[in-house]
Structures are given as C-alpha cells and as structure tokens.
C-alpha cells in the first residue's frame, strides 16, 4: 500500500508543478534569420498544450482511483465470484474475470477518454472524425484488448499460483509474447484500424527507396496509411521487427510536406532502422519489465494479509488481486517515466543526426519541424519539468536550431553516425 500512496503523492506533486509551470510565458524573441524556421506560437497552441499536459497527470490519478475503487468497494471480489459461478475451472474463471475487468474499466474511464480523445481534438480542429466512427474504433479496440488480455492474464495467474517467486516465470513468459506482438502488430493488428499501402506518389516513392539504399536499407519497405480519417496531425514511424519491419508515413504528412521535407523526416526514421533502435528499445523494455515484476512481487507481498482479506484476495494468482497488481505496476511505471523518456530522447536525437548526415537537408528538416509543431498545435517550448518528466522527443524549439547548425561536412569533420 505504501507504493500506491507514494504514487498518488507523486501525482499530486506533479499536478501542482504542472499548474505552476503551465502558465503562459512571454514569447521568446524570434531567432535572427529566415521566418520559415520560426514556429508561430499562438494562444490556442499554448492552451492546447496546457490541456494535454494536465490530462496526462489527470489520467494517472484517474487510473489509480479506478484501481482503488475495484478493491475498496468489493467490486473485484464480486466479479471473481460471478465468474466462479459460471465455471469451476480456475483458468476459465481467470479469463472471464479479465474480460469483465477490461470492460468495466473501459466504462469507468470512458468520461476521461471521451474528453481527451474526442472533445479536445475537435475543440482545437485536429480531427473531423465523427462520434460514431470514434466509438466504432474504440469498441473494436476493446474487443482486441479482451481477445489478447484474457488468455495472457489467465496464464499469468496460473504461474502466480504455481510458483512462489512468480515474478521470474512472468518475466520469462513475457519475452516471447512481447516479441510476437511486435512482429504481428504491423500485419495483423494495425490493419484492423487503418489501410496500409505502398506510397502512391511514384516520384516520392523512388526518392525514398533511393534514400533507403543510400542508408544501407535494401528492399526498403515504406508505406503510407490513411490516418486522415482520424486526425489532422502529422507523423511517421518505424515498427515491426524482422520480416515485418517497416517505415510508415501518415497520409497527412505526405499531403502537408514537400519532398525534401519528407526525405529529411524519413531519413530520421531510417536512422532508427539502421541503428536498430527497435531492438534496443525491446531490450530496455524487457529489462524494465524484469524490474517491474520483481518489485511488483515485493510490493504485493508487503500488503498486509488483513487488507487482502478485506479486499477479498485469497492469495497470489487470485483474479480478484488483479486491480492491486495493476496499481502496483502502474505506479512503478509512472515513477520510471523520466528515465525511459530520457532514453527515448537520446535515440530521437541520434536519429536526427543520422538524417542530417544522410540527406544534408538541414533547412528542409527545420521547416518540417515547424509544420509538425504548428499542425499539432503543441507549444514547442515546454517547461523543463514537462520535458524531463515525460517528453520522448527533444522539444521542437531545440530541434530546429540543431537542424540548421549541424553541418560537420562543411568543416571537414567526420560523421558521427551515418557511414560509420
């Protein structure tokens, strides 16, 4: 319980800091030079950023509150007992419990999800998606979540009943499951929500394939996806591993950026591919899960037996313990956010360097960042607290001047990353 209280205290402190640091700041003097490289920061952009930042911490507190609600009201115990009346087989009881837990959690968190995922994007003209389409995708996501989490959760509870030090088999079991999910996500899960196809613009496609070949990526797989049906924001990313590894561009970014800007952006994504950031990220993720499972069992075992009985938890592996385990894991994840964010920022900065060394399109990269900031309506200059706590990318206000100034080739200096 101490872990949960520390987590709630951390949320409270973070919320106060956000409230203080999120106040509008005086606009910094624009950098001398071409106005193309200056993000036009508006009051709307600042307001949207403050709302998104506040919603992050509100979501953390809300999630912790829902978990406590399951335990303190006896809801978790009642769901387990209802599942046990349907079948006596422990594995099936666990599957039924997890399915019900996912559904009830979705209902309880719907108000916040609706506000953050539908109201706010429409309020700031970041989407044209109808409520029906939005709800349809959420229901589809719910079904996928149940299909994946019910058997996985039941297996985890079986291991917890079988082994005294259950953190180790849970971690070992998570490794093949994680690898499988990363492999199948691009080809089985993502297409459930969007259409993926080779880049339609043949001139752009050839430029990107030539750039991939230059980067050392033969047989490059570059796709576009119809994200415009869900958002007006811009993005590109790398996902999958092995045969499913691919670089994906949203159709919104293709429509908004020039070919030079797209080459600079895709050079960044190719940097992730060449530097094997997907594999390194998986490694960091698995180490993080190891620590989470280990610390999770320590925290679970330290919850008093009297409190467990009050919540209807009979021991490790009892489905009714799932909300407690979720609270512990979520709190550990929240506290570890700054370290993981810092690691991600280092990878993103390395990918920026790789793109600049590969393409030499410094100005195009800078103007691409301007469009990314303005089209997402996010303040490119977040507070130091926001940056270090949860920003997975360097702030755009830092990336633009770096993109314009990083030119080692003009000084006869060697590249740091590409070609090494």
Image: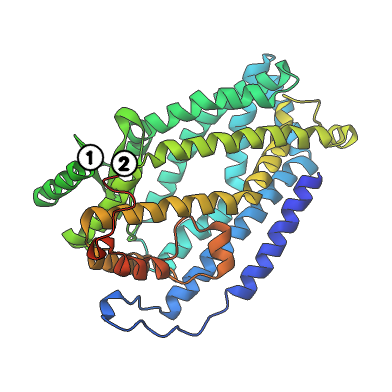
Determine whether label 1 and label 2 are within 8 Å by CB. Answer: yes
Q: Secondary structure at mark 2?
A: helix
Q: Is residue 409 left or right of residue 61?
A: left
| Residue 47 visible in this rendered orientation of the protein | yes
Q: Which mark is residue 274?
A: 2
Cα distance, mark 1 to mark 2? 7 Å
Q: Is residue 223 above or below residue 394?
A: above
Q: Secondary structure at mark 1?
A: loop
Quadrant of the image containing the N terminus: top right
At label 1, counting other C-alpha atoms closer than 10 Å, the crowd grade (few under 14, some 14-19, many 20 or more) is: some
Quadrant of the image containing the C terminus: top left
Q: Position of residue 50 (x, y in %)?
A: 53, 70
> Among all residues in the image, which is located at the extreme left?
203
Q: Is residue 73 above or below residue 320?
A: below
Q: Residue at x 23, y 40 (%)?
A: 216
Residue pointed to by mark 1: 216
Q: Nearer the viewer, residue 294 or 132?
A: 294
């Amino acid at each position: 319980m101490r872990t949960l209280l520390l987590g709630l205290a951390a949320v409270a402190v973070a919320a106060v800091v956000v409230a203080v640091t999120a106040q509008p700041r005086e606009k910094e003097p624009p950098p001398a030079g071409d106005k193309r490289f200056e993000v036009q920061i508006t009051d709307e952009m600042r307001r949207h950023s403050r709302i998104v930042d506040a919603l992050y911490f509100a979501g953390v507190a809300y999630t912790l509150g829902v978990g406590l609600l399951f335990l303190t009201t006896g809801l978790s115990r009642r769901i387990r007992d209802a599942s046990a009346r349907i079948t006596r087989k422990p594995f099936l009881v666990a599957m039924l419990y997890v399915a019900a837990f996912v559904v009830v959690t979705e209902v309880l968190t719907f108000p916040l999800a609706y506000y953050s995922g539908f109201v706010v994007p429409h309020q700031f003209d970041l989407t044209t998606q109808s409520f029906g389409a939005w709800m349809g995708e959420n229901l589809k996501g719910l079904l996928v979540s149940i299909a994946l989490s019910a058997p996985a959760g039941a297996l985890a509870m079986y291991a917890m009943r079988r082994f005294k030090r259950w953190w180790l088999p849970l971690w070992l079991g998570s490794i093949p499951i994680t690898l499988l999910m990363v492999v199948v996500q691009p080809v089985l899960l993502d297409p459930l929500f969007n259409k993926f196809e080779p880049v339609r613009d043949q001139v752009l496609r050839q430029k990107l394939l030539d750039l991939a070949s230059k980067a050392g990526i033969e047989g490059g797989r570059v796709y576009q996806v119809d994200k415009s049906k869900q958002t007006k924001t811009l993005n590109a990313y790398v996902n999958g591993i092995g045969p499913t590894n691919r670089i994906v561009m949203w159709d919104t970014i293709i429509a908004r950026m020039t070919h030079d800007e797209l080459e600079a952006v895709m050079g960044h994504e190719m940097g992730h591919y060449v530097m094997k950031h997907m594999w390194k990220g998986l490694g960091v993720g698995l180490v993080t899960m190891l620590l989470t499972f280990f610390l999770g069992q320590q925290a679970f075992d330290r919850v008093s037996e009297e409190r467990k009985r009050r919540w209807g938890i009979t021991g490790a592996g009892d489905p009714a313990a799932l909300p407690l385990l979720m609270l512990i894991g979520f709190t550990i994840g929240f506290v570890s956010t700054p370290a993981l964010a810092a690691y991600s920022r280092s990878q993103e900065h390395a990918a920026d360097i790789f793109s600049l060394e590969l393409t030499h399109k410094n100005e195009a990269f800078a103007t691409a960042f301007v469009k990314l900031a303005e089209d997402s309506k996010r303040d490119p200059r977040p507070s130091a607290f926001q940056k270090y706590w949860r920003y997975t990318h360097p702030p755009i206000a830092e990336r633009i001047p770096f993109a314009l100034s990083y030119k080692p080739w003009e000084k006869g200096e060697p590249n740091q990353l590409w070609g090494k």
